[in-house]
Structures are given as structure tokens and as C-alpha cells.
Amino acid sequence: MHPTVFSRSLLAASVLALAGSAATQVQADPKVLKVIPYADLKIVDPIWTTATITTHHGFMIYDTLIAQDENFQVQPQMLEGWKASDDKMTWTFTLRDGLKFHDGAPVRSADCIASIKRWAERDLGGQLLISRTESLEAVDDKTFVLKLNKPFGQVLETLGKISSNILFIMPERIASTSSAEQIKETIGSGPYRFVREEWVPGSKAVYAKFEDYVPRSEPPSMLAGGKVVKVDRVEWYYVPNKSTAMAALNAGEYDFYEAPSIDLLPMVQSNPNITVKVLNPVGLQVAMRPNTVIPPFDNVKARQALQYIVDQSEYMTAMVGNPDFWRACPSLFWCDSPVMTSAGGGERLLTKDLDKAKALLAESGYKGEKVVLMDPTDHPTHAAALLTAANLRKIGMNVEVQAMDWATLTSRRKSKNPADEGGWNVFHTRFGGDASSNPITHLGTNTGCDKAWFGWPCDAEAEKLKEAWVDELDDAKRKDVLDRYHTRLMEVAPFTPVGQYAIPSAYSNKLEGVLRTPTMVLWNISKKE
Amino acid sequence: MLTYVIRRLISTIPVLVVVALFVFLLLHLGPGDPAAIIAGDFATPEHIAQIRAKLGLDRPLHVQFFEWAGRLVQGDLGVSIFSNVPVATLIHQRLEPTLTMTVTTILFAVAVAIPSGVIAAWRRGRLADRVVMVLAVTGFSLPVFVLGYVLIYLLSIKAGMFPVQGYVPLKEGVWACLRSLALPSMSLGLVLVALIARMTRASMVEVLNQDYIRTARAKGLAPSPILIIHALKNAGIPIVTTVGLAVAVLIGGVVVTESVFAIPGIGRLTVEAILQKDYPVIQGVILVFSFVYVLVNLLIDMSYGLFDPRIRYDG
């Protein structure tokens, strides 16, 4: 045979042999849910890290004492209920019957107390709660009591908070690990158990139904209600290339894609077998964060100038595009949340006024010093960085855009040095809408100086108003305090929001019972054959 | 021969020491802090500092290096600072996809490229030669990710012949595994086909001009024995060198192909570790594959004797 003919025949034969019965390539096991999460699971300790993917993992294998329903109201989850004294200084919590960890041990008060203590070392809300705690003690295996030394109007909301770090309950021996160290065991009492031997960090994570889990009898509502597992197994596969992930979803190789690229949605929107829907009732707040410890943004007038260079629709169009998924918001808190307020002139966050910005910059005494803007080219805020650079130049700032990857940015943002000695002046980030819905957990509004988030804004008056909001037990008065707090924050300008958006999920129409939640949860979902 | 092999293996030790030192310094002196990445976007500076201290990243560089080197001498590559999983386990998990993809890609490339190169040399200057060389240049110029997407579109989405992405382990069936590797191997193999076909053609053209080939023709030998027994064997050394280097590159990881087809191989492990500054993983992977690279080169050198009996390694 002629060699070329031979090689062609060989190739064709190989291709055909491999294809074989390939036309029926899609495996659809109704008891296995195949999911593409937004990132790969590398860390399994939801207290050690605030990474959202680890929070997703946390909700798979752990349970929470208290959960929030779709109206953001707290509901008992592992708890049978709670009782507060008339002065709300003593809280008694009772666990419900039948709670077990994945190793078969019963969930006890001691496990809850150890978990609360470890969580409170990390979480801002937890730290505040513990700082006002006189004692936290077990009465018996099912009952424990929290005694406060100072009023705290957010006890239940804090224990049942929906943003990282979540108070997940672990066995006492695991929760005794230092919070600066990652736990070594992955045993919870949640609806799924982690199949650790099948875990391939960076690629695959597997969860099996926990047969002994006892769900609540109420219907599911956001993170509250019955967590009924209707599949035997959930497999997470990290697919780094978004086009490939979309094509695989289209071909039926996966059931659920948590966060597809909005640009690529047209690939599946014409597919009648795929649903595209925003499942997260709170999305992401995009923020421009100045460094308040070095010039020029150590001057409050220069920071206020930033509030006038932003047209949020411009930013959101550049970052997100499709207006179905974003909105402009005149608040430093999450719009649509109970704490949303525009008091103190929030409307100025919506449209540009470059003349006003120039005037404020002149008042700040800015003399053309170099401003270093960190631009993470591998992060969704890249477009926002470029827009801000252009807007700052329009008001006469001498901007140097320094391109870097996000990992480098997260390292460099820790520096308080001058910008030309490894420091920085401004960067963009995204705050979770859940955390931005509460003054205690919003990192951007914390003005606690060295204890504040990177940028280190410092304002004692704002912190006092926040404390007053926490202390206040009367709803009407709390609203008034909140408005005063927001007004003060608008003056201090610890950050400038440039819009908020939500990322839709895409999933097979074979799935029923997909819940709307601020984090990816996979209970209540069944899969049709 | 044995003395030669042992001497070559011993000579890898200083290479590995230099690689280890270089990689360690490069990683630790470069920007990026794994503690900040571990803590997450919403962590406080205080929390990050605590994690740094717990991981020992705040200690002097030489202390960290000697601690790592000490464990290395005992055969311990360390533990990922993110997942707490031993580096050896992480490499082991990723080895099968990488090795199977390497084997299928090389088999595909060799099966197509060597006959093509031989024919191009045999028909030098004619249509077959031109066609092979145009295809080789095209294959060489086409980025792997473009070809990957085209193959996914045509053979997976339109024809439904192969899965779009993913890797099926060998234990779930050889055919299922090969089907999952068909598209990545084809898209990756095309570049190698181009490279090996050009190398084969060039070597064969040189050999076909030799006197002994002319003698074989004059004796009335048929073209096939001349090409395969006399010419191809003598043109083998540069071809084997090219194939061997391709094997080393493929085992070292092909990031783009692994990303496009979601193959959980060594390449992705390395890049993800670099992006997250997972020092033990990066150091372990680079060290292991430096050794593999040296080993593959040794095997290539040793194979020369098969093609040319005049080459001997007597120590």
C-alpha cells in the first residue's frame, strides 16, 4: 500500500474506532449531580479562609445553628429554638434531636461552643459578639447559654450570618484547632459528606449523601428550612476554560454551571434544555479603594473627589455589559438590603461631576504627585481600573497604572509604604453583597484604622455610630442611627462604590428544586431521567 | 554501558541542586504572598499575618530553604500549603492523565508524521512533497487552542463523536479513556506531526543522496525496502531526538491543551500552583520534572546505538 494512503487509512480507522458509540457520549446518571463551580476547591477549612468556594464546600458538609430565609429573617436550623431573657442579655439555645456528625457521633453543646469560639477568632461579627460575651457555657449536651456583658442587637443575625465566615458547626476536637491553622479532618453534620479519597485539588471534589442527616420539616427557603438531599452523589469539576465549560454544559456533560461568563451566555440561551437564572439574591458590590495612610488620599477632600468621578452605569457597562445583571446604587451598603440608605448625599455616587471633583482635589492640596493604581489584569475589576485611570487623569491626576496579577495585588495591598517604595494609592475590589448588607460585616465601611481592611481608613466618629447601631434594640431608632452612620461615611469616603451586579447560573432543565441562595447549595435538587 | 548510565545519573545531582536553589530563590524573592491568597479577599491584615507566621513564611529565607532541602534529602517533597495534601500525592494524581495523553499524542504524531516525512523526501519537489510541507507549516503555525476549539466544534458539538472535555481514567475503561483523549491528542499532536515530518523529510533527503542508497537502487531493490530498511534507519537519530524531546515537553505539562480540554494533568497543577504561590508544589513539580527531563535525554542518547552500531557507551 502507498505509505500516504496507509497513514490516512490508519488515522481514519483510529478516529472511527475511538468514536465507536460516541454519538451517545452523554452520561446522565439521575442520582449523580455534575457541577462546575466558579473556582476549584483547594482549601477545605471555611474558617481558615474567607474564599467563597470554601464557603460552598462548608454548606455541603456542615450545618449551621441558625439560617436566614428568603426574606433574610433568621430561622432555627440545627437549633430547636432559642429563648432570650427580657433584657436580651441572656440567650438559651437548644439543639434539635437526631443531629449527628459524619463519623456517627452526636452533635453536642460542647461542639457548638468550640465552633463558635474558633469562628469568633476570625469573623468580624463573631469578634464583636465575643467581645460583649460574659460567658458561653453548656447546660447539658443539648442546651447552651450565652450571657452578654453589654447589649448586642444582632445576636441571632450574627450567629446566622450568610457571608464569610459562616458559623459552621464542627466536632469539638476539630474546632479546637487554632484558627490560624487549617483543620485536618473534614467531618461535619451537614447533608453531604466529603469523599476525601476522591478529592483532586484543582480538579475534582466529590460529596456523597449523608444518610443519617435529619432535615427540618419546613420547606426550604434560601438557607433555612429542610435540607433534603435527592441525589446520591454530587461531583464538582473545575473547568478552567469558560468556553469549554459552556460547550460541555450545552452537550449535557454537566448539569449545573455556577458562574458562566456573561459574555458567553448567548451560547446556551438558545438551547431549550438550559435555564439561565440569577440564583444569588445578593451579588457583588464593586468598590474603588483608596489608601488613606499615604498622600494624596490621606486627605479626605481627595477621597471625596473620587465620589464625583464615577458614573456607575459606565463602570457596570464596561465590567458586566448586559443591564439585566447590574444596577447602580446610591448607597455604600447593598441596595435592596434592609440597611440600604442614601443618607448624606448618596445620589452623588451615581453620576459624574468632574468640575466638583477637580475643585475638591485642589482643596486637598494635590500637587501632581504620582498616583499608583494597581490593575489586576486577570481579575474582573480590570475594566474598572482602566476607567478609573482615565477618570483620574481627566481631573488632573498623575496616574501610573501598574498591571499585575490578582495574586500579586493581594500581596502588595498589605503595604503601607509610599507608592514608589512598593506601596499603592488605589485599587478596585469586589465585596460580597451579603457582607455589604450589614455594617458589622462590611469590610469597606470599617474605619477602625489599623484594624480596618486594606486602605486603613480611620474615623472614630463613624466607628462610634456603628457601635450605636449595634447597641440599639429599637428598630425605628436603629434606622435613624444608620442614616447618621451612612452620612458620616459619605464624608469620610473610605471607598467609592462603582456599581453592583449578580452573576447568573446556567443549568439543565432536568434539574428541579434549584434554590435561590447567596451561596451555591445543592440540596433539594432532583434530576429527571 | 552500565557505568555510563550510572555516571549520567550521578551527574544529574548537581543539576537538581542548582535547579532546587534557583527555583526556591525565584519563588520567594518574587512578588506574591500565599498567606494573603489563603486568607481570601475578605480577610483582615491581622489574619494574614497570623497565617504567615503559622506557615513559617515569616522566617528568614535560608532557614526555610534548609528545612525544605533537609526534607527533600529524605525523599519528602513537602505538603501543599493550600490543600494540606502531600506534593507527591498531588503529582501522582496528575500523572496518569499526563502520561496517557503523552503516549496517545506521540503515537498519533509518529504514526502520521514519519510516513508523511518519508513520502515527502521520496517524492521531493513533487506534489506529495509540497502538500506534506504545506500541511506541516500550517500545523506548526496553528495555535493549539484555536485547533482545539475547531475540533471541539466540529467533532464534539456538531458530530457528537467525542466528549467536549474532561478525562476518563483508565480504570473506567481503555476505550472511554482513549475517547476522552482523542481531541486533545489530535490538537496537540498536529504541532508534533509538523515538527517530526519536517525533521524526517530533511534527514531522509540527506540519506537518500548517499552512495549506498544509489547502490541499493542499482541492485534493483524495491522502493519500500530502500526507504524503510536502508534510509529510514540511517535517518533515525535526529528523528528520535525530536520525538524524545517532544515526550519530555509533553510529560512536563501542556498547559493550554489541558486547560482547553479540562484535563487534570501536570501542566495545570504547575500553573495553578504558580498563580497561588503554592511554594512546595511548584518546587516539587519542577524538581521531579527536571529529573524526568534528564532521564529522557539519557534514554535518547542510549537509543542512538540502536540506529548506529558505531555509537558505543563503554564508560
Image: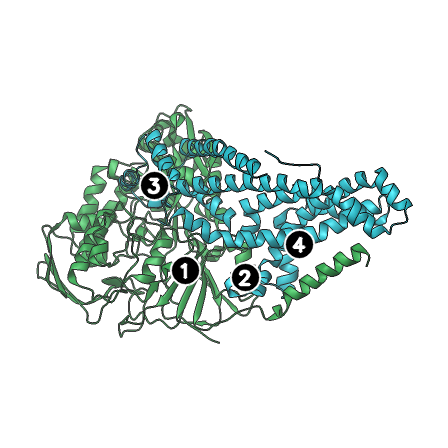
Labelled disc at residue A198: 1
- The answer to whether any part of residue B3 appears in the image is yes
CA–CA distance in space, label 4 to label 2: 25 Å
Q: Which chain is green?
A: A
Q: Amino acid at mark 1?
A: Glu
Q: Position of residue B99 (x, y in %)?
A: 55, 52
Which element carries disc 3, helix, strand or loop? helix
Q: Chain of mark 1?
A: A
Looking at the image, residue B199 sits to the left or right of residue A266; the answer is right
Residue at 62% of width from left, 36% of height from top?
B313
Q: Amino acid at mark 2?
A: Ala
Tell me residue B84's x, y (percent). Answer: 35, 49
Within 10 angstroms of label 1, few (less than 14), some, or many (20 or more) residues? few
Q: Amino acid at mark 4?
A: Phe
Q: Which chain is cyan?
A: B
- Per the rendering, the mark at residue B108 is 4
Q: Is residue A372 above or below residue A30?
A: above
Instruction: Quote the CA–CA distance across marks 2 and 3.
Output: 34 Å
Pair 3/4: label in front: 4
Earlier sequence position, callout 3 versus callout 4: 3
Residue position for label 2: A248
Residue identified by numbered label 3: B35
Name the chain letter of the residue that bears numbered label 2.
Answer: A
Vertical arrangement, residue B279 with respect to residue A170, above or below: above
Precedes in sequence: disc 1 or disc 2: 1
User: Relative to residue A248, is residue A94 drawn left or right?
Assistant: left
